[in-house]
Each structure stands twice: as structure tokens, then as C-alpha cells.
Image: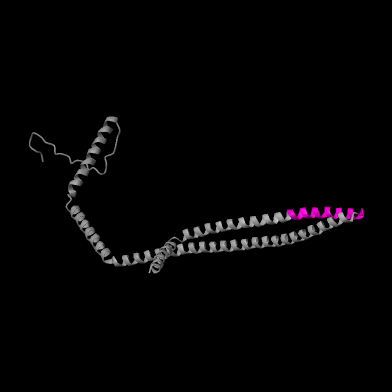
Amino acid sequence: MFKRLGNLIRGFFGLFISGLERQNPEALLEVEKEHLRKQIGNYNEGLAAHAGLCERLMTQIRRLETEERELRAKTAANLRAGNREAAGNYALRLQSSQRELTENRTQLQQAETTYKELIKARDVSVKAAQAKIQELKSSLDDLKIKKATAELTEMASGMITSIGGSGDTLDRLHKMVEEEREKAAGRARVARDSMNTSEIVEKEEEQKALAEQALADFAAKEGIAIEPSADVSAPAAEPVKSMGPATE
């Protein structure tokens, strides 16, 4: 029972984590990139240790080569001198040194081959992981674009539907505007028809007459002869009055 309950809890947690991963794919990708960097670091540490082994083998080989030359020279010198016992001991040591040198050379060759294979495997794995990460980044960018396009399309579709559904409202608004415009035009016409234009004409004529009179007074003072304006009509001559009876 407890095992089943544990499985159920793990299942719920798995679904929860899967949902978070779906909502944040960029974060999951960054985690995988960091994990890859750590793996490469650990792998490089192993390569460094293997490279150290190769260096130790090369050092031993150089030491054994030097020892081989010395033992070969000592064996030959003692043999020429007739010291067979010493020459035999040096010959035994030379054989042992040669066997060890051969083994070290074989180990070095194998170690170098393994090192190159490890380097190649690392480079291939890293390139494959980088290519996959780049592909995922491109897919995420494409996903963002498609999501944005889908959202814009849905918004546009909703706008078209709402605009189409608001036709009655627009018609009512247009009717209200037209009614108000007609009322305003009618009020303007009534105001224009009720205006007393005769008073305006009289005022205008009076202003012109006053202006002409002022101009005539100025010309008389300055001694300037001016012609009467054609717009202002000459005043009618008054009849001459006399004390006696009018003559026929």
C-alpha cells in the first residue's frame, strides 16, 4: 500500500515538473547547457589524468633508454677486458632494462592511442550536443513566432467578430449624429431668417457717411481738393425761403 502511495506521489510530482518544463522550455535548455559544461569539465579532468600517465611513461622510457645505453657500454667494456662475471651481471641488467623499456613503449603507444580516441570522442560528443542545443534554440524561436502569430490571428478574428456584431450600435450612432446635425442646421436657418438685415444696412451706410464727412473736413483743413465719393449721394437742395409772397 505504501509503495503504491509512493508511486502515486512520484507520479504527481512528475506531472507537476513536466508541466513546469513545458511552460519554461528556455530554462530547461539552460539547465541542460550547464549540465553539458559540467560533463565536459569532468571529462577534461579525466583526460588530464590520462595525459599525465602518458607523460610518466615517456619519462620512464627516457630513463630506461639512458640506462640501456650505459649498461650496453659497461657490458661491452667488461667483456673486452676479460671480466666475464661483471660483464654477465651487466648483461642480465641490460636484458631486464630492455624488457621494461619494451613494455613501457607498448604501454605508451596504447596510452597515446587511447588519449587520441578519448579526445575524438569528446569532440564528437560536444559537437553533437551543441548541434542539438542549436536545433532546440531554433525550434524554441520558431515556437515563439508561431505562438505570437496564433495569438495575433486569434485577436484579429475576435476583432472581426466584435466589429461585425457591433453593426447595430454603429447604425444607431450614425442615425443620432444625422438627427443632431439636421437640428443644428434648422436652428441656424431660423436664426438667419429672423435677423433684421435692414438695420445692418443702415448702420453700414451711416458708417460710410461719417467716414466721408471726416475725410472732407480733413481735406478742407489741409487745402486738398477731393472728388466726392460715388457711394455717397449728394444731399438734396433745400428750397429758399423768402418773407414775401412766392413769385411765379
Q: Residue furthest front?
A: 85
* Relative to 9, 69 lies left or right: right
Front in this rendered view, residue 216 or 95: 95
Q: What residue sits 56% from the left and 58% below the top?
A: 39
Q: Give percent across and percent down for residue 93.
A: 81, 56
Front in this rendered view, residue 41 or 107: 107
In the rendered image, which quarter contains the N terminus?
A: bottom left
Q: Give percent across and percent down for residue 242.
A: 10, 35
Q: What residue sits 27% from the left and 41% below the top?
A: 229
Residue 95 sits above or below residue 205 on the image: below
User: Is 104 inside the magenta-drawn segment?
Assistant: no
Residue 85 sits above or below residue 202 on the image: below
* Relative to 173, 100 lies left or right: right
Q: Give percent across and percent down for residue 121.
A: 63, 63
Q: Residue furthest left?
A: 245
Query: Which region shows up in magenta?
Result: 59-82
Residue 237 sits above or below residue 121 on the image: above
User: Is 68 inside the magenta-drawn segment?
Assistant: yes
